[in-house]
Amino acid sequence: MPCHEVEIHVFPPLKEETQDDLYSLTRFPDDAVRLRNPHIQEMEQDILYHLALGSGSHDLVEMFSDVRFVCMGGTPKRMEGFANYIMDEIGHKLPAGTTLLDISYHSYRYSMYKVGPVLCFSHGMGIPSVGILLHEVIKLMYHAKCKNPIFFRLGTCGGIGIEGGNLVITESAVDGMMQPYLELPVLGKMQRRPAILDKQLANDLKNLHCDTDPFSVTVGKTMCTYDFYEGQGRLDGAFCDYKEEDKLEFLQKIHDANVVNMEMESLCFAALCQHAGIKAAVICVTLLNRLHGDQVSTPKETLNKWQEYPQMLVARYIKKQIGLPFDIPQREHPQV
């Protein structure tokens, strides 16, 4: 059967929406989340398939209406650890005889833990995985009537000019071609959504850094790629058609353009949160300096410690927002 070329149309760049325009599209008068999808309210029920929840099968308002902060990271283990950590930091007490529960266990896709006003998710790896999760979490915010939630991605990355064990807060995200928007084919046309993050939130997080912290904090651009190996210019993948000097020239070029790290989710995270009118931030710990190599050779115990650093900064922000002293844990010992 002969192949037929499909004409691909690219939408013109979206007209920049004012804050008032964005608010009216994404919020109800009481600040509850509004969806930019008229079809959802016409449905008898909305099944959040990958979260194992549904607007008809669960009382989402009762379960989640008090959520103010949504924190997501790559792996279920890391986010379970963060859920226990934030529970101690804010002094949240579970009913006697109960323990933290993975609410989305039966989805076999993502993990979800609720700790008072904080909702914790694992988002998997890469743009497709985080994009699917964000669609359903934003819909969950709508069904639960949550008001002005703040989203955080806590992740790992490769530093560019930054050694391992330090934090990068993303001021804006670009793709592998340095384009500051997410491209998504929709009905044969390329949709472009700006990857914008809240600058004030980034600055507020940076200002919570303490002199005694074992890490530095840098605010800069993040390159989000669709691949861990060739897409990030690594030399250690199964395929490589370029030389080391080509790699270093590319990394130096983007470093000169204020790109300070690489990962695989920020572009989608920023674009979808911006389109939903949700204040959001990306905080990642560097696992290595890509100007010095490609492989992550740091001992696992050290890597596990480093992955706690973004959690520390986000916990301080959450505690400050809910009126707790951010430098003192509310409970020194975890519940048993």
Image (spheres, helix red, strand yellow):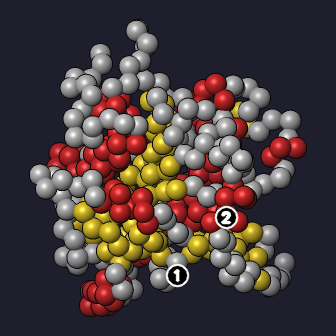
Q: How many marks?
A: 2
Mark 1 against mark 2, which lies toward the viewer?
Answer: 2
328 or 213: nearer the eye? 328
Q: Which mark is residue 279?
A: none
Q: Position of residue 243 (x, y in %)?
A: 30, 89
* Quarter where residue 107 is shown: top right
- Tell me the residue at 35%/47% (across/down): 317
Q: Residue at x 67, y 64 (%)?
A: 20
Residue 329 visible in the shown view? yes
Q: Are marks 1 and 2 in contact (CB under 8 Å)?
A: no
Q: Which of the image's four quarters has the N terminus? A: bottom right
As helix, strand or loop, the secondary structure at mark 1 comes to: loop
Residue 164: image x %, image y %? 20, 63
Mark 2 falls on what kind of element? helix
Q: Nearer the viewer, residue 21 or 194?
A: 21
Mark 1 vs mark 2, CA separation in Å: 26 Å
Q: Quadrant of residue 253?
A: bottom left
- Nearer to the camera, 318 or 227: 318
What amino acid is at disc 2? Asp
Q: Residues within 10 Å of mark 1 (few under 14, many from 20)?
A: some
Q: Nearer the viewer, residue 172 or 75?
A: 172
**Residue ranking furthest to the left:** 212
Task: Using the image, tell me which numbered label, if any, was put on residue 20.
Answer: 2
Position of residue 312 measured from the top left corner of the image (x, y, whole percent): 27, 45
Residue 245 is situated, as x and y percent measured from the top left of the image, at 26, 91
Q: Is residue 53 visible?
A: no
Q: Is residue 275 left or right of residue 332?
A: right
- What residue is rendered at 30% in x and 19% in y? 335
Q: Of the residues under marks 1 and 2, which one precedes in the sequence?
A: 2
In the picture of the structure, the residue carrying the numbered disc 1 is: 179
